[in-house]
Image (cartoon, rainbow, N blue to C red):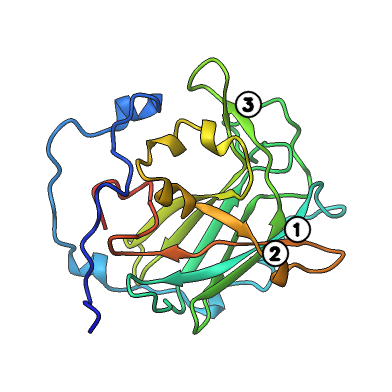
Amino acid sequence: MIDELCQRDRNWHPPALAEQYKSSVTRAPHQPLLSLPGSESELTGPTFGHDDIDRLDCDLIRNYAQTGDPIGERIILHGRILDENARPVPNTLVEIWQANAGGRYRHQADGYLAPIDPNFGGCGRTLTDDEGRYSFRTIKPGPYPWHNWMNSWRPAHVHFSVFGTAFAQRLITQMYFEGDPLIAKCPIVSTIPDQAGIDQLVAVMDMNATLPMDAIAYRFDVVLRGHRSTPFENRPEGN
């Protein structure tokens, strides 16, 4: 018999305070964490339905294009959203956002010298199907420098947001790409103490889902709860 609840493994997830990740020094809590029960408004509705999703929301190659396709390597991101017992989580909203192929976000606070792509917005969303599956078509993001140490670079990554049955039930994480040498050099990634936990954030190339002469596919599954849950950056206290 499979237990319905799996204890969280705290050796698997990153600590809130990590000296090599400079901004965590000012953002990490300095007092013991409190466990607060969710209120009724936090645990129930509103929910998301297919009427809230446009057919192009999951296609980042087309959903912002003005004069043509965006520049960069065309890819497919797909996978499943699962609970702690590997059961699919259907009809849940998955959102992604990312930099363009040059490593530049379409955001007023992004001052990196790489150019903005006029045909790439960098945001998408979709609902999982009955088997917990999701899929996006997009451009592979580029790495970019950031103000951590003198020569710090973020590996190519895509931000993922997974909603539950209410707006307050939201988990956020980052997905990296198999084979990227910057993963091992990233101060944020290195806060995760277990290599297996890091590996769970790395999407693997999936040639079976690749579109010939079009886009290479990467598979990234998300585990929401339990002792091997995906590390989530907005839930350092556990899930």
Q: Which residue is mark 3?
A: 111
Foreground: 114 or 131? 131
The reply to whether the C-beta atoms of the residues labelled 3 and 1 are less than 8 Å apart is no
Q: At numbered mark 1, what does the secondary structure look like: helix, strand or loop?
A: loop
Cα separation, mark 3 vs mark 1, equals: 23 Å
Q: Which mark is residue 61?
A: 1
212 relative position to 204: left or right: right
Q: Which mark is residue 37?
A: none
Cα separation, mark 1 vs mark 2, equals: 5 Å
Q: At numbered mark 2, what does the secondary structure look like: helix, strand or loop?
A: loop
| Amino acid type assigned to the residue bearing label 2 in the image | Asp
Residue in the image at 29% along x and 46% along y: 236
| Amino acid type assigned to the residue bearing label 1 in the image | Ile
Q: Which residue is mark 2?
A: 59
96 relative position to 21: left or right: right
The percent coordinates of residue 189 (x first, y second) are 46, 39
Q: Quadrant of the C terminus?
A: bottom left
